[in-house]
Amino acid sequence: MIRRLATLLLLAGPAWAQEETPTPEEVDAPAVDVPEEDPLSAYRVRFDILVDRTIGTASQPVVFNWRRSTVHAAATGSFLVELNTFNSMRAGGMVRLPGQRSIVELGLSWAEVWDSQSSRQLAYTPYRQPGRPDRFDLDVMVGLPLAEGVVTAAPRLFPATQLVLNGYVGLRYGLYPTGWGGMTPGQVVGAIFNPVMTEIELDNLESARLDAMEVDPQRYGFMAGLGNDIYFEQGFFVSPRLLLSLPLLAPATQTRLVMTADASVVIGMAF
Amino acid sequence: MRAAALALCLLSCGKVPLTPVNARFRIADAAWFAEESTLFLFWEVRAEQGLGEPSVIEIRYTTDDARLDWTPVDDLEAVHVHVPVDCGTDKLCGSTSLAVPLEPREVEIRLRYHEDGELALETDTAFNVVGPGAPHDHRSLVVYGVFDETNSFVQWRGRHQFPTLRNQTATRLGLRRAFTIDDTTYGTLDSDWFSLNPYGYGGSCPETFGPTEMPPLTTLARAVFHPDEVPIAAAGSPVLCASATVNDAQGEFTTAAVARRNPEVASAFPLLRSPVHDARTIPYFLAPCDRTISSEHEEMQRQRLLLGPLPTTCTDDWQQPGWYESLVVELREEVERTRVLGDDMVLVIGLHHDDEALADLLEDALDAIVPAERHRSSPRLAGAFVYDSTSHEVSLDSLSPVALWCPAELPLAELPDVSARSCPTLPDEPELDLGPLSFGTLPVFPNRDEYLEFLDDFGKRQAGEMLEQRFRVPEFAATSDHVDLGDFGVVTFLNGEAISSDADDAFSFCLPEEPAPIIARSTLMEVPVVRDAIIQGCRSGQLPPGVCEVGRTGLLPIEALPDWHDLAGEDAYELGLFWDFPFLLRLEYEARVAGSVTALGFTVPFGLGTPTETFYGAQTWLDDEFSLTDVLTQCRRWCDHPTFDGAGVYQLGESFWPSYAQRCYRPAFPQRGDGGFPRDP
């Protein structure tokens, strides 16, 4: 898990790499006048350089301070790029809870799945392909700000905005409306925590699947990705993002649908 | 790190593969019935990923005048009702029936994966032709009737008959057949009607049958109870016969359907009751008065027998002439004095002595009194119980069946047989020593050596205590008749209990969990010529083993009664009770696990007491009634009719007799309201 997170953060490497790389001023700065025998000389940095390094945390928001908002309410829409022949889109709502170092997101979306030309052709054959029927997706995500600042919008007609680059990690839980039909309360409780859907649930979903679809048994999976939060002065924000379903839980969920890309847009208001 | 991420992507980023559904036919059967001009088709397809609604079954066939190319079954009109069937998510199954006047050939069934697709799964179809013939074996449906437990409501049933499919499978695959019952009549049919036609389907009802006036009945289910009770006028008739109408591609077909009554079965003799009471004890304590053998042992013997301050019958002069005779007279007179109280009696004697010859003398005295009372009616002296000072075994054959003598030294091999009639000194109760700790137990009736040794080790307080003793004795009526079987025991016919029967009755014996000590006898069993014939028959192996007992004793174990009645067909059987000892001694005492700790030359005893109950004698007298309700059942009428088994299946080939002669008869009859699709494989 830690290695994979580190892999993700590598993608955000440039944001931090700038901090590691000496600035031109740093390179050209005259050497500090210290005695040659001073053992701390290799660790000494000039005051103006230190100020420049911490300026991002010492004086963060200029246009909108999202950390001081209480809650965000937003609508989401996304297109799922699965590695099969079925089409899927999602639409739903989201609640975001800001913190000083992160932002927690709780989302509920309806995922609509429909046939493509390919899957319609596939249904004529004695072959099936893993997929997921219509469902609710329950998301629990954590956003970690990687870089942020005030940016100028184009065209200049728009005011300056607050831009935050977030890394996202979290779980996506699939809720199938007809999946628990005919199950006892005890079986439902057991199924909720089971990473794999039970035989009863799979049987119940037979009528909900598309003709060429073999129902994928995964109940929940791990998501990670990147996205930008663009805040306007009044608290209105737009957040395009790209998430990937990583196969970290695949051995437990027995899924064959991995590396699904979720390209989504979140539009909402911070309060 | 980047390499790992690249490897992860290479493993996971490929397109999701396609997987074959692996569909295959489990059933693809077709049958054409010439008598009905109907072609039946059945199918069941299984696939791993399931088959959706777009999947369709198609059929084709050829006749001499037409050819049907591949056609979805839903596009063809069915002769009968075929309901949609849900066989599960991974199956597709169903059935249809087509009007095909001429015999078809090349009948085939296939699965088209999608109604708009071109791909199909073909299979070898099992096709049979049923030619013209009798209705009971040349038509696809047989109609018959059964009765409920009371034999007063009739359930009419349809049964599918296909060459390759069972009745319930045809139902499961969606086939429903309508049939109508009308003109129900009653009467008697001889067994020839059913010899080659077990359901009796076909033909026409005899004109001699009387009408029941029961209204017509139509159903689409496989079974339906007629809502009206069979009229009382038909109550004694073994058979109902009705007109059964079914439809097919040719139209309607009407023929006779028959319902046979269930065998009329009841418990042969529900309860054999033998009152058992607590006997009145006649206590004696025989011991020397002029000397002391062991006061501790005498005290323990008195406590064990709960004699209290009973005066001692002195044995100082037991070797003198006349002592024995006076003891016999004393005992006999005491028995007679107690008899006037009206209770059965048991002599309870404590024998405290140090000369084994005195025990033998007491045996002789008891032998002069007790055996003679054995077969008397109540009030009587049922037996004797002696608690001896030393281990002793009764040596008189006439006394051993009526006297319980404790303690006794018995060979281990005999323990299981006779330990209930004596108090064996078990050799396998040694003390257990664990370092300074030692443990031991004392039998309820120890001999003197055992007791005194125990006292030395653990003390008197750990010896246990008798709390209660009761002698349970059966009450014999004045009409009781006893048949003595010597060492085996006695069979007592208590009070004329008997089973009445007709020659055409039949019995069923069901082996109970606890063996029933019930014996039967009849007039014929006591005839010497018959007994000799039985002995001869058994020697040649022609008779069942249970019946052979009659030849030796004139008595019949109850389990052999079904076979005997089949042979002899007698009109009455007297029931008796077998027993091997005249009373049951029931003891309640406090048994103690005694222990002692020895350290530094001091020994401290301790013990743990538990209330214990023990029985000696015949456990037959634990209960005063013996239920035969489920053990012996008697069929009074229609014993050769088929009947239901415990699973509710109408077993056409198993009539009450002889199928249930030695099997438990636990039929599960159909009940009104239990659904229209009974278990009928």
Image (cartoon, rainbow, N blue to C red):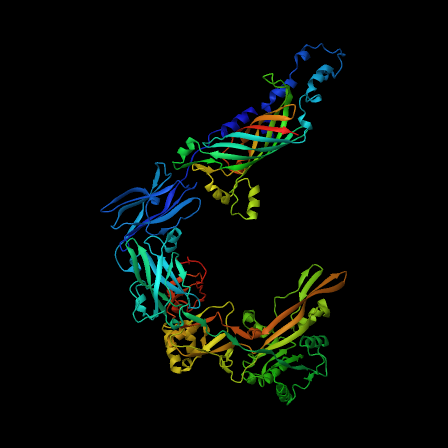
Q: Left or right: where does residue A176 sit relative to residue B139?
A: right
Residue B613 screen position, x and y as percent: 63, 70
Q: Is residue B536 above or below residue A259?
A: below
Task: Tell which residue pokes out farthest to the bottom in this image.
Answer: B322
Q: Residue at x 72, y 17 (%)?
A: A51
Most foreground residue, B338 or A59: A59
Query: Which residue is rendered at x = 37% and y = 39% of the image?
Result: B113
Residue in the image at 72% along x and 60% along y: B436
Residue B518 shown left or right of residue B388 in the figure? left
**Which residue is situated farthest in the left direction here?**
B64
Residue at image point 67% right, 21% down: A63
Q: Quadrant of residue B611?
A: bottom right
Q: Is A34 displayed left or right of B658 in the figure? A: right
Q: Nearer the viewer, residue B332 or B496?
A: B496
Residue B424 in sight from this viewpoint: no
The mark total stands at 0
